[in-house]
Image (cartoon, rainbow, N blue to C red):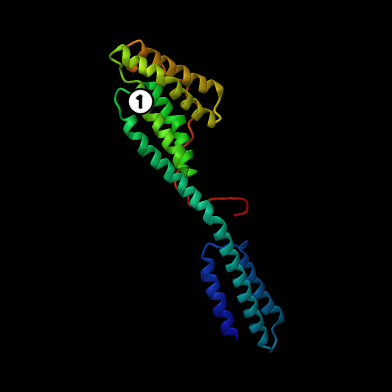
Amino acid sequence: PARRLLDGISRAAIRCGPLAGHENPLYARITEIVERLQNEFTQDTGLFDTLCLELNTFLDAQEDAADARAAQAAPLVVEQERQELAVMTVDQALASWLAMPLLPSAVTDLLTHEWRMLLIRHYVDQDDNAWGAAMGTISDLVASIEPQPDAQSRKRLAARLPTLVRRICDGLASLEMADERRLALIDALFSMHAAVLRGAAPLLTKTQAPVTAAEPARIASEHIEHGET
């Protein structure tokens, strides 16, 4: 009986790890076992069997609690991974547009901040329709700043712009951004399109809407807290 109890304590201590301190529940339980042996043991070896059973019951309860915590943590880890994958996917999707050497600063500003946040949200929500619409808006926006060589092409662009601007405004509104920032972006895009409709190239425009602090990039995390989990 004494050996069985000692073996049980040894296995539990190995599971506990070398960094467990006095506050560890298993450490406290082993301390309690030792104290009971010192205080209660006389000649009856049945005490060893009793303490061994209590230790095994305690370890089973610890295992059940660990399983419950793992079940609670799993969705949090999945969500974290989805967020990280969303950032990577969006950055890859925007890379080709942002690599364009003559992309106006107003468009670059929009893509690298608000539209990037919007795409990340759609990816995390697994909203394929919203993702497709947002990507289509980018494509149409980039096409809208290309030089229009004749009056007829500028007329067709003028007919498309209200719908494009409304789609951009709807996307910005869904982010609940500050009015000052939103209006600055819209004004910058308006100036850019006005230049195109006049037959001028907006590519030399360097006016950039004021940028609020960008959300820091998320990185992989080994520790995630949620309530007591």
| Residue at x-position 47% and y-position 17% | 187
Tag 1: amino acid:
Val
* Residue nearest the observer in this picture, 141 or 208: 141
Give residue 50's position: percent from left, percent from top: 66, 82
| Residue at x-position 48% and y-position 31% | 214
Give the image quarter of residue 158: top left
Give residue 154's position: percent from left, percent from top: 34, 15
Q: Is residue 138 above or below residue 49?
A: above
* Residue nearest the observer in this picture, 38 or 209: 209
Lateral position of residue 105 relative to residue 121, left or right: left
Give residue 7's position: percent from left, percent from top: 54, 79
Q: Quadrant of the N terminus?
A: bottom right
Lateral position of residue 170 relative to residue 40, left or right: left
* Residue nearest the observer in this picture, 176 or 12: 176
Give residue 226's position: percent from left, percent from top: 59, 50
Lateral position of residue 77 relative to residue 160, left or right: right
Lateral position of residue 99 relative to residue 170, left or right: left
* Residue nearest the observer in this picture, 106 or 21: 106
Counting labels gives 1
Which residue matches tag 1? Answer: 142
The residue carrying pointer 1 sits among few (fewer than 14), some (14 to 19) or many (20 or more) residues within 10 Å by Cα, namely some
Q: Quadrant of the C terminus?
A: bottom right
| Residue at x-position 62% and y-position 69% | 61
Q: Is residue 30 above or below residue 42?
A: above
Q: Is residue 163 visible?
A: yes
Give the image quarter of residue 165: top left
Q: Is residue 156 above or below residue 222?
A: above
Q: Residue furthest top?
A: 198
